[in-house]
Image: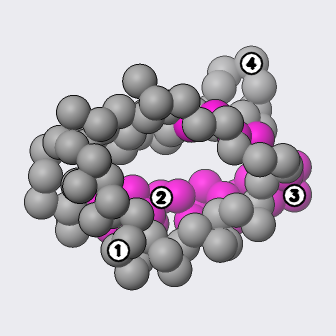
Amino acid sequence: MFRMLIRLKVLDHKVVEFEQLVSTLVANIHANEPEPKIYEVRRVVDQPRTYVYFIEFKDQAANDAYANALYHQNAAPAIMACLDGDPVYETL
């Protein structure tokens, strides 16, 4: 099992754009990924510009397939442009 937690902070003026991009990305993941998985994105209650991704794929290969999927590669630069600093990645 491959699990990761990603914490990131969004620029104040990019919150709406970020949420739209992530909503589309998550819909694409659930529509296109064949492996059982969890891909949840949640806003931290007391930090309104901070979000946490919880990702679970069957294995590293399934994660790699997602990372290389065209819809992910198209969305990633726009999502990254919304961030206030670098994401923090934790493998679980």
Mark-to-mark CA distance, 1 and 4:
33 Å
Residue 67 coordinates in the image, percent (x, y): 40, 63
Q: Is residue 20 left or right of residue 4?
A: right
Q: CA distance from mark 4 to mark 3?
A: 18 Å
Residue 31 spot, x, y in % from top left: 21, 65
Query: In the rendered structure, are the residues bearing label 1 and label 3 in contact, judged by CB atoms less than 8 Å apart?
Result: no
Q: Residue at x 72, y 34 (%)?
A: 50
Span colored in magenta: 6-29
* Three-letter amino acid code at the position of disc 2: Ser
* Magenta span dominant secondary structure: helix
Q: Amino acid at mark 3?
A: His
The one nearer the camera, 84 or 92, is 92
Instruction: Find numbered disc 2 in the image and state the secondary structure of the residue it sits on.
Output: helix
Structural crowding at the residue carrying mark 3, measured as other residues with C-alpha within 10 Å and reported as few (<14), some (14–19) or many (≥20): few
Rendered image quadrant of residue 20: bottom right
Q: Is residue 18 above or below residue 46?
A: below
Q: Which residue is depicted at the point 33% across and 60% down?
A: 64
Q: Earlier in the sequence, mark 4 or mark 2?
A: 2
Give the residue pinned by disc 3.
Answer: 13
Mark 3: which secondary structure? helix
